[in-house]
Image: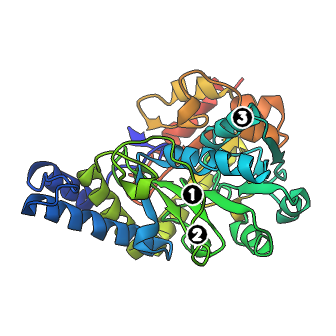
């Protein structure tokens, strides 16, 4: 069976796996232990990983806060501003209707505390117009949060344009970069991005480790209140013993992403062209403007094809999904596709295939044959 669900998680690169295992079995010291060589070597390995992660987005080592993943990073960036927002009287937030639940649910929590959240709609092509963000800005806008790449459609959002229009506005700018980190690299180097969230397992690293990169504005520190206390690690933003093997793996994954991004992207473009050519006889309706998509995914529906029936028909041949992995335990129609104004039939039939540079060849003839059998 060929794995075609890389937007959910990616396979681990062999060099990353080797590094993780080394720091699990040989270099097992605690990076917080300052009295012996085991701890010193662990600390040095963590610092090297911070440098590798920071270099990918043109940040500084001290700006890399290590977390359990992008979901935790999103929560810290959003909920961490609650106290400051209340004290400053800035309680307005701007985001989009197509954000991941790891962003939308923290916003819902803030709304219950009296914050006002403006969720701007996307175009039918799946991206948000910067002008709509600009129109929504107010004097009391505390935060603007826009994902870099949509996890369901693969559509790249105009992060650079949004960052540019925020240069003259004091609102903090947060980017959920889970899907684009290490893939669409230049965007995330824009200095006007105050905070960005990422996970290692989306770039061929281990699960359970991520980052919230927090840039300083000149010498000003972003006024985040931690969500947990105890230990003082990560500059007081996120306490807890550092998982050194996972951090080292994240660092290696980030370094490889920077080194190999263009080659990986070209491999993925070739795969996408093959997939589109193979699916063409079924006349797929592509959801999201392919000209604005990363070359790693396609979201589509086929007339008369139910997504659940399709996945069952393809079982044992290819592993695909019909939406975000975070909501797959109980299928709920995609809020992303709803926001893009798709028909109910297209939403119910939507499938997402996503791949990477290590994906094996697919028997597309068999895929088409099986899908044809379940088209009503």
Percent coordinates x, y for residue 58 in the rendering: 50, 77
Q: Answer above or below: position of 249 versus 372.
A: below
The image shows a total of numbered marks equal to 3
As drawn, is 221 to the left or to the right of 208? right
Q: Are marks 2 and 3 in contact (CB under 8 Å)?
A: no
C-beta proximity under 8 Å, tags 1 and 2: yes
Dot 1 crowding, Cα within 10 Å, few <14, some 14–19, many 20+? many
The answer to whether residue 244 is seen in the rendering is yes
Which residue is label 2 attached to? Answer: 188
Q: Is residue 203 visible?
A: no
Q: Position of residue 143 (x, y in %)?
A: 72, 55
Is 117 left, or right, of 325 in this rendering? right
- Residue on which disc 3 sits: 108
Please provide percent x and percent y for residue 193: 63, 68
Q: In the image, what residue occupies the spot 51% across and 59% down?
A: 271
Where does label 1 land, which residue? 177
Identify the image quadrant of residue 328.
top right
> Which residue occupies the foreground of this view, 83 or 179?
83
Q: Tag on residue 85?
A: none
Q: Secondary structure at mark 2?
A: helix
């Amino acid at each position: 069976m060929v794995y075609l669900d890389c937007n959910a998680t990616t396979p681990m690169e062999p060099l990353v796996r080797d590094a993780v295992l080394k720091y699990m079995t040989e270099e097992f010291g605690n990076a917080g232990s300052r009295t012996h060589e085991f701890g010193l070597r662990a600390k040095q390995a963590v610092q090297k990983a911070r440098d590798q992660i920071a270099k990918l987005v043109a940040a500084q080592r001290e700006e890399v806060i290590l977390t359990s993943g992008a979901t935790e990073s999103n929560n810290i960036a959003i909920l961490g501003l609650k106290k400051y927002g209340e004290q400053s009287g800035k309680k307005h937030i701007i985001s989009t209707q197509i954000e991941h639940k790891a962003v939308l649910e923290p916003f819902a929590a803030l709304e219950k505390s009296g914050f006002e959240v403006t969720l701007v709609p996307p175009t039918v092509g799946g991206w948000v117009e910067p002008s709509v963000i600009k129109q929504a800005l107010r004097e009391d806008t505390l935060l603007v949060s826009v994902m870099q790449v949509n996890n369901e459609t693969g559509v790249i959002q105009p992060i650079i344009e949004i960052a540019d229009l925020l240069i003259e506005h004091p609102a903090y700018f947060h980017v959920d970069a889970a899907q684009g980190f290490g893939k669409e690299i230049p965007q995330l180097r824009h200095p006007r991005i105050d905070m960005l969230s990422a996970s290692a397992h989306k770039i061929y690293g281990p699960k359970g480790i991520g980052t919230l990169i927090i840039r300083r504005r000149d010498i000003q520190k972003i006024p985040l209140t931690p969500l947990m206390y105890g230990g003082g690690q990560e500059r007081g933003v996120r306490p807890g013993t550092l998982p050194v093997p996972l951090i080292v793996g994240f660092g290696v994954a980030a370094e490889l992403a920077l080194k190999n991004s263009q080659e990986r992207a070209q491999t993925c473009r070739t795969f996408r062209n093959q997939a589109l050519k193979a699916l063409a006889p079924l006349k797929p309706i592509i959801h999201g403007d392919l000209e604005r998509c990363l070359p790693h995914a396609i979201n589509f529906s086929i007339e008369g094809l139910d997504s659940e029936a399709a996945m069952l028909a393809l079982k044992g041949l290819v592993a695909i999904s019909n939406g975000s992995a975070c909501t797959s335990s109980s299928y709920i129609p995609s809020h992303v596709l709803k926001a893009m104004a798709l028909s109910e039939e297209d939403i119910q039939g939507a499938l997402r295939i996503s791949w990477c540079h290590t994906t094996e060849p697919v028997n597309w003839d068999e895929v088409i044959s099986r899908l044809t059998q379940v088209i009503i």
